[in-house]
């Protein structure tokens, strides 16, 4: 990757995925999709979860899958789903993804005082 | 297209008409005394279809300037206006607008800062925003207000530095004067459309004014982006170069409209003056009356007024005032714990001069206290007497402070 120097008057950077960190580490509840209830199972997904997701982490692809690396667990998809197919499940119950690494990151965030 | 015509206008009406003539596209302002007439007039222009702009009502000055920042970022010519506590409420965004290099123009109708509550004039509000990175121009009368509004967009959009057009509350804002209102077609000719520097491209998206850390670093495209300090250097550099633009725009305005305002500073009977009176805004106009009185008493006095306070016309002032014996500076504000801000800056401007006049500072007219020309005359005479006793510097004098 060659380095060009910017000539901007104000800060204007090309964004990259994950620039602000893996925000999925902020989550304490996660969306779990019941694919038997999701409208996609009936042939045509409504994609309302995708439309309403403020983080853009639900691609418009059936079957619905949330990108958990960046999902903050806000629960808007669960609130909006007309089929009641999404439930928010606490991360510390039955989660295989919360390991020592994520705990360390959560601790660091708590110490930082946030943004 | 209508030609220029003379109307009887308040300073606020002149400001609003100036913004209208510049065809501002987004106006967001919150009414506050003594600025309210500006917002009222602009909202009427929009409501009557005389100005093709979005008038966005907001719940605070913080939001007003936030709206202007968003609109200016996406390419709209924007205007806001405020006074005193409203300006203070904008404070966070005042710094943001400058750092984001957005050519917003703001009318600042100078008013005293509370406490105690006071709606009358001094210049503490805008002087307290001195270091935010805005160009500050102080108008001396209502004609200069409308003309400076038009100049301000040219200056802001050429330098990408926001401009505050400051004028004294009540003394100018609510006082009627004959004002030549330029014709729309001549303003259109003078002021080209605004071209934003921001990159707004769906195929090449950007984070704007994102978290920018201490050191330069590569963005996702491999471009080495400025760190915070580099961007702030660019703002400082733009401010230091701005006098060139301000003088040129004022001169071009003179060619186009037959009036110019001195660029960075202006003088009155100061060519051969031994004693100079320096101030900004309407107080400098008042000082011209004092100068006539002093001249009639055989004292070679003159005015050298600050029109643009930031960037500070240090070299220009030093060139003009260094031949005088005494400079009396009248500030309508105070840097508490030190001196009047203009006074301190005039002193600093003279530092490198081998032969310097004495500089005496006075604070006058705080919270609407009337300043009379004879009081300025008395202060100048007191300073002359003090200088005869060898006082090249002295404590800040408080004019007509009855304590």
Image: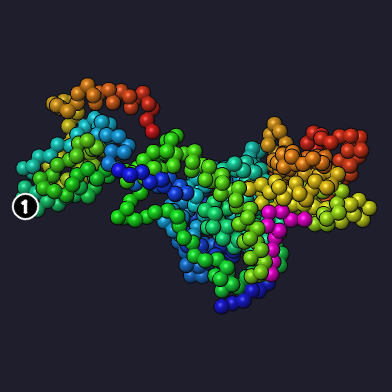
| Quarter-of-image position of residue B130 | top right
* Quadrant that contains the N terminus of chain B: bottom right
Instruction: Name the secondary structure under disc 1.
Output: loop
**Residue at screen point 84% across, 36% down:** B392
The percent coordinates of residue A108 (x first, y second) are: 32, 24
Give the magenta part as a residue range.
Answer: B258-267
* Quadrant that contains the C terminus of chain B: top right
Residue B311 painted magenta? no
Query: As drawn, which residue projects farthest toward the right?
Result: B298
Left or right: residue B290 versus residue A63 is: right
A59 and B80: which is toward the camera: A59
Query: As drawn, which residue projects farthest toward the front?
Result: A2
Task: Tell which subunit mark 1 falls on.
Answer: A
**Residue at screen point 47% across, 67% down:** B52
Query: As drawn, which residue projects farthest toward the bottom?
Result: B1
What predominant SS class does the magenta segment belong to? loop
Left or right: residue A30 versus residue B61 is: left
The colour scheme used here is: rainbow
B175 and B93: which is toward the camera: B93
A107 and A38: which is toward the camera: A107
- Asked if residue A77 is positioned above or below residue B192 in the image, the reply reads above
**Local crowd size for mark 1, using a 10 Å CA cut-off: few (<14), some (14–19), many (≥20):** few
The percent coordinates of residue B59 (x first, y second) are: 47, 49
Q: Is residue B79 visible?
A: no
**Residue at screen point 83% across, 55% down:** B271
**Residue at screen point 92% across, 56% down:** B296
Left or right: residue B52 versus residue B390 is: left
Q: How many marks?
A: 1
Q: Can you identify the residue that label 1 sits on?
A: A43
Residue B261 painted magenta? yes
């Amino acid at each position: 990757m060659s380095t060009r120097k910017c000539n901007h008057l104000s800060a204007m950077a090309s964004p990259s995925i994950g620039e602000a960190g893996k925000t999925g580490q902020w989550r304490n509840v996660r969306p779990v999709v019941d694919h038997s209830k999701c409208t996609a199972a009936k042939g045509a997904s409504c994609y309302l979860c995708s439309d309403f997701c403020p983080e853009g982490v639900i691609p418009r692809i059936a079957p619905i899958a949330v990108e958990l690396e960046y999902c903050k667990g806000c629960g808007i998809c669960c609130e909006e789903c007309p089929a009641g197919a999404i439930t928010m499940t606490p991360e510390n119950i039955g989660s295989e993804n919360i390991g020592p690494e994520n705990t360390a990151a959560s601790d660091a965030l708590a110490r930082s005082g946030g943004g | 297209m209508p030609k220029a015509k003379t109307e009887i206008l308040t300073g606020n009406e002149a400001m609003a008409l100036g913004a209208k003539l510049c065809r501002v596209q987004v106006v967001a302002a919150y009414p506050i005394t003594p600025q309210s007439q500006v917002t009222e007039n602009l909202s009427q222009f929009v409501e009557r279809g005389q100005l093709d702009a979005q008038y966005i009502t907001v719940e605070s000055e913080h939001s007003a300037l936030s709206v202007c920042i968003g609109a200016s970022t996406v390419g709209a010519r924007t205007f806001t206006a405020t006074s005193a506590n409203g300006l203070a409420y904008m404070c966070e965004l005042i710094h943001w607008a400058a750092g984001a290099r957005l050519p917003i123009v703001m009318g600042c109708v100078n008013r005293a800062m509370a406490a105690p509550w006071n709606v009358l004039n001094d210049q503490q509000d805008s002087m307290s925003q001195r270091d935010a990175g805005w160009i500050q121009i102080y108008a001396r009368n209502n004609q200069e207000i409308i003309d400076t509004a038009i100049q301000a967009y040219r200056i802001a959009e050429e330098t990408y530095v926001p401009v505050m057009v400051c004028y004294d509350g009540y003394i100018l804002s609510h006082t009627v004067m004959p004002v030549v209102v330029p014709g729309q077609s001549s303003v259109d000719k003078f002021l080209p459309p605004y071209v934003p520097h921001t990159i707004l491209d769906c195929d090449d998206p950007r984070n704007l004014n994102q978290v920018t850390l201490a050191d330069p670093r590569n963005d996702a495209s491999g471009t080495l982006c400025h760190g915070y300090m580099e961007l702030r250097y660019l703002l400082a550099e733009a401010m230091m170069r701005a006098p060139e633009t301000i003088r040129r725009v004022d001169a071009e305005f003179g060619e186009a409209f037959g009036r110019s305002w001195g660029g960075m500073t202006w003088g009155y009977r100061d060519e051969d003056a031994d004693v100079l009176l320096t101030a900004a805004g309407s107080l400098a106009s008042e000082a011209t009356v004092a100068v006539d009185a002093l001249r009639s008493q055989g004292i070679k006095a003159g005015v050298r007024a600050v029109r643009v306070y930031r960037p500070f016309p240090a070299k220009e002032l030093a060139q003009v005032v260094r031949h005088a014996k005494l400079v009396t500076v009248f500030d309508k504000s105070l840097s508490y714990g030190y001196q009047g801000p203009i006074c301190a800056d005039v002193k600093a401007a003279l530092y490198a001069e081998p032969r310097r006049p004495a500089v005496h500072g006075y604070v006058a007219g705080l919270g609407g206290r009337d300043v009379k020309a004879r009081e300025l005359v008395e202060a100048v005479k007191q300073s002359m007497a003090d200088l005869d006793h060898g006082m090249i510097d002295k404590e800040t004098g408080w004019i007509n402070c009855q304590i």
